[in-house]
Amino acid sequence: TIKTTRPRGPRRLLAPYKLMSVRIQIQVSHLFAVRSHSAPLGKLRRCNTHLGASRTSGIPLKPSLEWASSARTCSSGFAWRAVSAFRRARTMTTTRCSATASTKEAARYGEWSSPITSSSITSSSIRLGGGVLEGDAVFWVEGRPAEKGRQVMVKYDLGSGISTDVTPEEASGFNVRTRVHEYGGGASLVAPGGETIYFVNFSDQRLYRQDIGAEPVALVAADTGLRFADMVLDTTRNRLVCVVEDHSAKAKEPVNYLAAIPLGCPEGAAVPEKLTGGHDFYASPRVSPDGRQLAWIAWDHPSMPWDSTRLYTADFTADGHVENAQVIHGAEGDISVVHPLWSPVGGKLYFISDASSGWWNVWQCTPTPGASPAQCACACVREGAEFAGPMWGLGASEYQCLPDGRLVCSFSNASESGTRLGILDPTTGLLTPIETGYTHFGGVSISCPTPDTFQITAVVGSSVAPSAICVSPPLAPGDGKSPIQVPEDGWKVLKRSSSSEVDEAYLSVPQAIEYPTERGLTAWMIYYPPTSKDFQGPEGERPPLLVKTHGGPTGATSTAYNLSIQYWTSRGVAVADVNYGGSTGYGREYRDRLKGNWGIVDVEDSCNAAKYLADIGQVDAKRCAISGGSAGGYTTLAALAFKDTFNAGASHYGVANLEMLAGDTHKFESRYLDSLVGPYPEEKVKYQERAPINSVDTITCPLAQFQGLEDKIVPPNQAEVMYAAVKSKGIPTALVMFEGEQHGFRQAENIRRALDGEMYFYGKVFGFEAKMPDDFVPLEIENL
């Protein structure tokens, strides 16, 4: 009998490493006793040093555990100085109590059967947008792969518990999606009371009004070349204020500005009235509660919104125009300010900025109509915490105001996985945690059923449960002296992103690992070991590894429930989801590592993740693959072209030609490469040197590519040229082109084809027989 010591507090995964119990002299795994709510390595890292490798040499240390009197106590209740790799500890089975090694069948990694199939992922999965609680109903937008990616507004009646589609049926052609910035966002608005919605229809990009239960009515004329997004009601003047992107001139780039759309016009007769323009991009127009002021975000080429933006305010004139526009924050440049939000009291304006600390924290000021710019101050300085992410899409909801001016917000912590909820008091800077059973939150919205309570509507989730639209019970804001407790079963689940029920014994527990990389730095990955209720690998065999590189490249992966990752691990393939230098969630300094270094830092960090896992004995160094989409596809192709770490790869709509991308992409990203690589054509040599398509001669391993034929961001000819070049070298290669797909796959049959096709490809080139669905048509692999 072995007595282990388990930390106090929630049942959490403490570390990705096999540790020794404080009270015994043999190695045991805490993974046997816990369920993951994703708070792994960061807690250990904060206690002392990096686990598993020397920070100076980057060489994995021998498994050991040193206890020092100077060790600090971390929040889990343990005090230790852990210096551990899992070179020998890998022989231990990291399973849950429900399935032990003795009950499992030995089978080659990659050949395990799994209940997590491409069909179950697509047929039972939807994309959920943030919810809005109005009256007794909650509204949200969901994307449906089964309807070719169509996005639909849904209404859930809290009284009856019945959800209905507000958007007309699929045959109508209505699809709630805008193409502003091509990535869209902010395509719908629910009016107060919940009786009317406004939305942009994808096919014609017109603005529509729809009363609940009635057919949509167009507000603006057809074929104007205008696109709309990020709407807000100006109730004082009975109009919408929104971002407009004007493509009517057929110029090289469209013109962006803010405009007002009157609501009292006959069908199709509303004419947008320009309020302000002159900058290359606009976002987040917000009307003050008294209707006297307008706030917004603007920025110009070559900056991206996570590089340098400006927060403006202006006064409304008697006839509804704006005057006295002034920069409130960001005038000095190199500051990313996003998401302005007016307080219902005191005329305060909140916003999120990475000024001073380098972390996206909440700031505040009190603009006065007609006065000089107000002084701004950080409402809560929290280094290591981010209250926003990169603004790829418009209309995001990161935080909301309570009637007393306090803020309900979601935030992340660099040392922990996932996001949290809290109440921020801007007057004191006190951040009170809202403790829940969930670890991921997005699209936060609130309502106040009584003067003394509030309810939260959000997309919530964890590493072991699919995300869902949920509503909290009525909560009291409290006095800020103690956390607000919301039991997991206290949330009302309105709609899950997946109806597929998966036994947790098939789910790999995500493990956040900080590992050594180039120039004495460290990077982050989320590691998923192969996990199955039914199978284990043969004695002496190590699993193949799939390194996944996220898109962006300014973005991040997370530990949220992701069946597209569990698809691999439940079949015996380990996955390392890399947050390479340049990813968000780790502060501006980490985010800026990629400036001028795209194709270098991301490639190095991806390669070093694979090397690290291979060096400590977790994966087979001879069966390491890399895969990514969009910018992650570029990192994949670059890693194959410029390094010899990987043995195969798969690019999903990935960039192969940087010069082509610089000259043939949409406005929003047309100058993105200025910061990632350098200004073009001044730095033309760099573009050529870092383009995988120019170094195809150095690719020596198999490559599969999956590409949409209607992709405007990464034109399909890049994949075609890359395929032809690899094929001509006699290397195994495959190219799958999808009709009707743009940048990213939305149709269920294509998502399935890409996922199963990639698995099939690795099986063929790595020498294992992957279990394919009965309706799978084998890929045509040249030179196999």
Image (cartoon, rainbow, N blue to C red):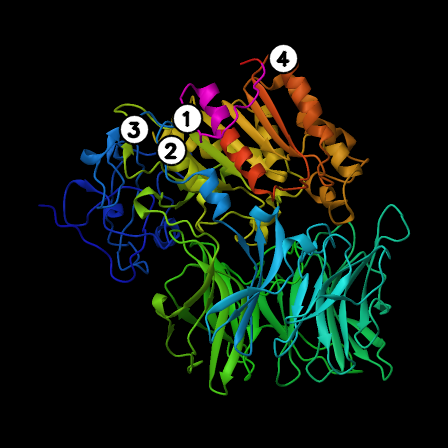
Q: Is residue 706 left or right of residue 200?
A: left
Query: What residue range appears in magenta?
Result: 759-782
Of labels 4 and 2, earlier in sequence is 2
Lower position in the chain sequence, tag 2 or tag 1: 2
- Find residue 687 and report its horizontal and vertical position in percent: 73, 31
The Cα–Cα distance between marks 2 and 1, rounded to whole angstroms, is 8 Å
Distance from disc 4 to disc 2, alpha carbons, whole Å, reads: 31 Å
Please report contact status of discs 3 and 2: CB closer than 8 Å, yes or no: no
The residue type indicated by label 3 comes to Gly
Residue for badge 4: 729
**Residue shown at 79% from the left, 72% from the top:** 326
Q: Secondary structure at mark 1?
A: loop
- Left or right of 356 in this view: 679: right
Q: Disc 2 residue type?
A: Arg
Look at the numbered disc 4 and give the secondary structure of its residue: loop
Q: Of label 1 and label 4, which has the lower sequence position?
A: 4
Disc 3: which residue: 537
Q: Position of residue 447 (x, y in %)?
A: 53, 77
Q: Position of residue 235 (x, y in %)?
A: 73, 80
The residue that mark 2 highlights is: 571
Name the mark on residue 456.
none
Marking on residue 770: 1
Does the CB distance between marks 2 and 1 fall below 8 Å?
A: yes
Query: At numbered mark 3, what does the secondary structure look like: helix, strand or loop?
Result: loop
